[in-house]
């Protein structure tokens, strides 16, 4: 039996610690941990197997930028010597990079299955899953531009099947992301235009359909145009609603650091590609039919172009053209504002801090603005204005502007470095390893955010 003498008496006084002492001790401990983590830099991954663990979905943005350059070169209204050759070169580069990224993601799924699975649930990595579909969309349009004229009609038939499959896959990706990434709680500061990426494949389904409708036979083009309008509207309006949350963030929270501002250029994609789709639908197909109807003295009715019981007559097709043309103008204006604003903010922020830092967000300079420049090219062909034609001449500068991004990306891969959100590999690898440990311990971002909100963070 234990005696009362062995127990501490009730009158025993324990050493008291004030709240301020506890806070200072906690700050010292946190500073010590932070200092040790900075001094003990994590080992950089070397070898294909090790690097594949960090081969994230945003690596496909390199494909999106390269394919966007190839599309812009092919769509430039100013013909120049070597235009097709230069565009074909970028097309083949896009194919090679796409295969490398597919190999990297596949290796990640084979060698690091838990990390690969967690990428669908993590907000920082999972929102870029649709980039694989967007990268494939650039290849699809490049095949139409650079392969169809030299192959034959059988390729057009194959592309119709591939396009329908692409639209279905885009819808499946959106549903998967709604279930996985959207299942975790996120603070308002984590919302960016990249959250619209899950509906971008649907929107690009309309854009790719507009390119496909220009090369298919007349009797098969109507269902492509109608379905493309539905896909484009689906992606455009969903993106608009999601971008409204990002605008709320930009109103309530201060401007992020300059190295993170370029990701805001993703907001240029929805209005730019929608304007491109609208202008492409009327310029590449409907106007061609109108000219044919005029030249043939209405010998061939629009029933040849719209086999579904004569959806539109010649006058209806003309109204269709005018509506598509003028609807693309306000979309182009919105895209222009969303394109100029990040450039101004980045320039001012960089001048203030007097420091340049390259990040993966610089790739947003290429692909999201592709639709805006291509819409300008289409409008330049339809409107008697030299402004649009001069504007699209920026296409010729895009391959040169892309070279620094290629150099920095290849250097990072060669050195075993990964860039994310403006952080160097040391910070990035440490953060990804911490997230992986949290996942293995059953800790989710939702639990951390709930704890922060409960503590008044």
Image (cartoon, rainbow, N blue to C red):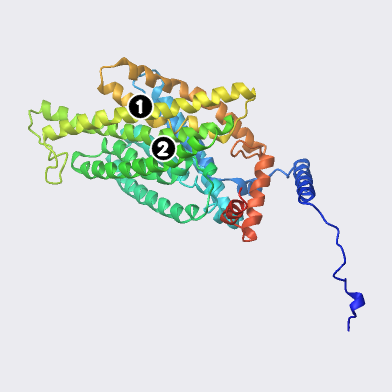
Q: Tag on residue 55?
A: none
Q: Is residue 211 above or below residue 1?
A: above
Q: Is residue 441 above or below residue 167?
A: below
Please state the horizontal and vertical placement of residue 66, each as a whole percent of the image.
Answer: 47, 33
Q: Give the quadrant of the N terminus.
A: bottom right
Question: Regarding mark 1 in the picture, which secondary structure is present there?
Answer: helix
| Residue at the extreme right of the image, as rendered | 5
- Give the quarter of the image for residue 355: top right
Instruction: Identify which residue, 29 or 416, lies in the foreground.
Output: 29
Q: Is residue 270 left or right of residue 230?
A: right
Q: Is residue 395 left or right of residue 434?
A: left
Instruction: Identify which residue, 36 or 297, lies in the foreground.
Output: 36
Q: Tag on residue 333?
A: 1
Instruction: Identify which residue, 364 or 55, lies in the foreground.
Output: 364
Whether residue 374 is visible to the viewer of this picture, yes or no, is no
Please state the horizontal and vertical placement of residue 288, each as a whole percent of the image.
Answer: 20, 30
Determine which residue is flagged by label 2.
138
* Circle 2 crowding by C-alpha within 10 Å: few under 14, some 14–19, many from 20: many
> Disc 2, disc 1: CB below 8 Å?
no
User: What is the distance, in whole Å, between disc 2 and disc 1 at their CAs?
Assistant: 24 Å
* Circle 1 crowding by C-alpha within 10 Å: few under 14, some 14–19, many from 20: some
Whether residue 312 is visible to the viewer of this picture, yes or no, is yes
Q: Is residue 42 left or right of residue 455?
A: right
| Mark 2 or mark 1, whichever is nearer to me | 1
The residue shown at (38%, 37%) is: 270
Please state the horizontal and vertical placement of residue 381, each as a whole percent of the image.
Answer: 28, 22
The residue shown at (25%, 41%) is: 225
């Amino acid at each position: 039996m234990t005696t009362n003498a062995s127990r501490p008496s009730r009158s025993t006084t324990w050493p008291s610690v004030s709240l301020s002492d506890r806070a200072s001790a906690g700050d010292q401990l946190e500073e010590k941990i932070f200092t040790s983590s900075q001094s003990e830099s994590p080992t950089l991954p070397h070898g294909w197997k090790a690097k594949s663990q960090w081969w994230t979905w945003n690596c496909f943005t390199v494909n999106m930028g390269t394919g966007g350059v190839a599309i812009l070169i092919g769509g430039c209204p100013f013909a120049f010597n070597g235009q097709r050759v230069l565009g074909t070169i970028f097309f083949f580069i896009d194919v090679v990079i796409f295969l490398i990224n597919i190999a990297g993601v596949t290796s990640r799924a084979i060698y690091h299955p838990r990390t690969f699975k967690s990428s669908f649930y993590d907000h920082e990595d999972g929102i870029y899953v649709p980039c694989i579909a967007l990268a494939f969309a650039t290849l699809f349009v490049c095949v139409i531009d650079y392969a169809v004229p030299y192959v034959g009609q059988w390729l057009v038939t194959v592309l119709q099947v591939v396009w329908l499959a692409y639209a279905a896959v885009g819808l499946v990706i959106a549903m998967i992301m709604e279930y996985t990434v959207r299942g975790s709680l996120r603070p308002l500061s984590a919302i960016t235009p990249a959250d619209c990426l899950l509906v971008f494949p649907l929107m690009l389904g309309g854009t790719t359909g507009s390119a496909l409708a220009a090369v298919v036979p007349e009797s098969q083009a109507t269902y492509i145009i109608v379905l493309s309008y539905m896909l484009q509207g689906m992606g455009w309006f969903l993106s608009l609603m999601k971008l409204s949350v990002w605008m709320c963030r930009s109103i309530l929270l201060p401007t992020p650091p300059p190295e993170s501002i370029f990701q805001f250029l993703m907001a240029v994609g929805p209005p730019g590609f929608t304007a491109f789709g609208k202008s492409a639908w009327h310029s590449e197909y409907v106007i061609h039919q109108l000219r044919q109807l005029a030249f043939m003295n209405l010998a061939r009715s629009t029933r040849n172009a719209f086999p579904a019981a004569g959806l539109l007559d010649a006058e209806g097709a003309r109204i269709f053209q005018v509506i598509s043309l003028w609807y693309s103008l306000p979309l182009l204006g919105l895209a222009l504002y969303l394109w100029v604003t990040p450039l101004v903010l980045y320039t001012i922020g960089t001048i203030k801090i007097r420091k340049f830092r390259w990040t993966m967000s610089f790739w947003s300079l290429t692909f999201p603005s592709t639709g805006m420049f291509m819409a300008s090219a289409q409008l330049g062909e339809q409107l008697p204005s030299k402004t649009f034609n001069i504007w699209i001449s920026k296409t010729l500068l895009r391959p040169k502007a892309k070279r620094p991004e290629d150099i920095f990306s290849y250097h990072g891969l060669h050195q075993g470095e990964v860039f994310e959100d403006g952080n160097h590999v040391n910070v990035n690898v440490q953060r990804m390893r911490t997230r992986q440990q949290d996942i293995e311990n059953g800790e989710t971002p939702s639990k951390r955010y709930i704890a922060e909100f409960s503590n008044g963070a």
